[in-house]
Amino acid sequence: MTSTVPFQIIDDDDDEFDWEAAVREIDASCERANNPSSTTINQASSSNFTPPVNILNNSSYYSCTKTGTCKQSTLDKFTGRANPPVNPTVEVRHLQGNGIINSDGRPCCVEIDAEAAKTWIYPVNVPLRDYQLAITKTALFTNTLVALPTGLGKTLTAAVVMYNYFRWFPDGKIVFAAPSRPLVMQQIEAWHNIVGTPQEWTIDMTGQVCPTKRACFWKTKRVFFVTPQVLEKDIQSGTCLAKHLVCLVMDEAHRASGNYSYCVAIREVLAIPVQLRISALTATPGSKQPAVQHIIDNLQISALEYRSESDPDVIPYVDDRKIELIEVALGYGEIEACFGGLITPHHIRKLLSSHGIRLAYEMLEEKWKQWYLLVHSPLQHCLDHLNISFHDQFLVFIGYATSSK
């Protein structure tokens, strides 16, 4: 956002100019422009609401892209106000799914439940892993790319983030997108196993669900497990209540390039605009820095949580694997023989149908001299059959020629 404060043209040759003061003034002007309600991190709000997380950088709680669009980092962007940072309160208990839908019919706006937002919940019905807890803390309050090897619990971190936004925003819509129908069904099952929310709030939608039914579900449900194509089409058609979106999780995030549905959906949502938390999950983020940066830019990511199987906090949970290298002795000649054995019958059939039996017999007789065809008993049988057939036809021809004389 461009500041409305006029700027004075400064002569670079003026050695007495206070550059530090100018920089401070520019920063202050930009901060006032980005916070029209004069809410900064150091100002006390008139509300009693307490943010549920420490803000790491007191000078700015938005992380902005090069184009000037802001990537949300805290819940303050939802509430429009902020208090002095305090230590986060963590309530750890079994998740019971006690989210409530407000009944006052608020259209196209999502309000935070200030009381619920004072705490965030992490399940104790699963073994506690430090790296999962650390990733969850980041993903709750920052748009995060979670890169974890397969089987190390990306789904758990996503479920915890989704559930807390389910609690914090009683009118909000939470979406989990996965690129195939089997993955959608797998994730919705994992969601119910981890957090146990009432099933009446949850729905899975793939291309097999007609648009009319999907439009009804977008109005009546709160947690959606969808394919990227369904999400893209429903946002573009307006059936998805995009202004009610508060949390979007994308599985297999390494697909987010070009005009893939993930990228299109993000662009459509941010154009509304809407404030939402984005979590991207992948086991293979990419081996080259530009590829990873491309994903980060397309999905508006502000933080990267990466773990490999060799990281100290992950090693205790990686299953021991025995790798045995088996060398198969397969030379070029054997491969050529197998290929010849596959195409020869087809060639024989074409010769028989086009030119008669003589050329086929001559070809197989030549192949007979090559050792590698001896191992193919079907071809040997075919050769014998053609030999007998040709011999019989030759005798018939001789008999006909003799009788004609």
Image (tube, rainbow, N blue to C red):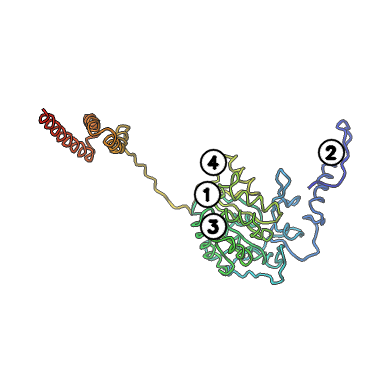
Q: Marks 3/2: CA distance?
A: 59 Å
Q: Nearer the viewer, residue 200 or 239?
A: 239
| Residue sticking out furthest to the front | 405
Q: Marks 2/4: CA distance?
A: 42 Å
Q: Which mark is nearer the camera, 2 or 1?
A: 1
Q: Amino acid at mark 4?
A: Ser
Crowding near the residue tagged with mark 2, few <14, some 14–19, many ≥20 C-alpha atoms within 10 Å: few
Q: Which mark is nearer the camera, 3 or 1?
A: 3
Q: Which mark is nearer the camera, 4 or 3?
A: 3
Q: Nearer the viewer, residue 310 or 94?
A: 94
**Which callout, 3 or 1, points at the residue further toward the start of the chain?**
3
Residue picked out by circle 1: 283
Q: Secondary structure at mark 3?
A: loop
Q: Which mark is residue 287?
A: 4
**Which callout, 2 or 1, points at the residue further toward the start of the chain?**
2
Q: Amino acid at mark 3?
A: Gly
Residue picked out by circle 2: 19
Residue 222 horizontal/vertical position (percent)? 62, 65
Q: Nearer the viewer, residue 285 or 54?
A: 285
**Which callout, 3 or 2, points at the residue further toward the start of the chain?**
2
Q: Amino acid at mark 1?
A: Ala
Vertical order, 310 against 369 (above or below) = below
**Which callout, 4 or 3, points at the residue further toward the start of the chain?**
3
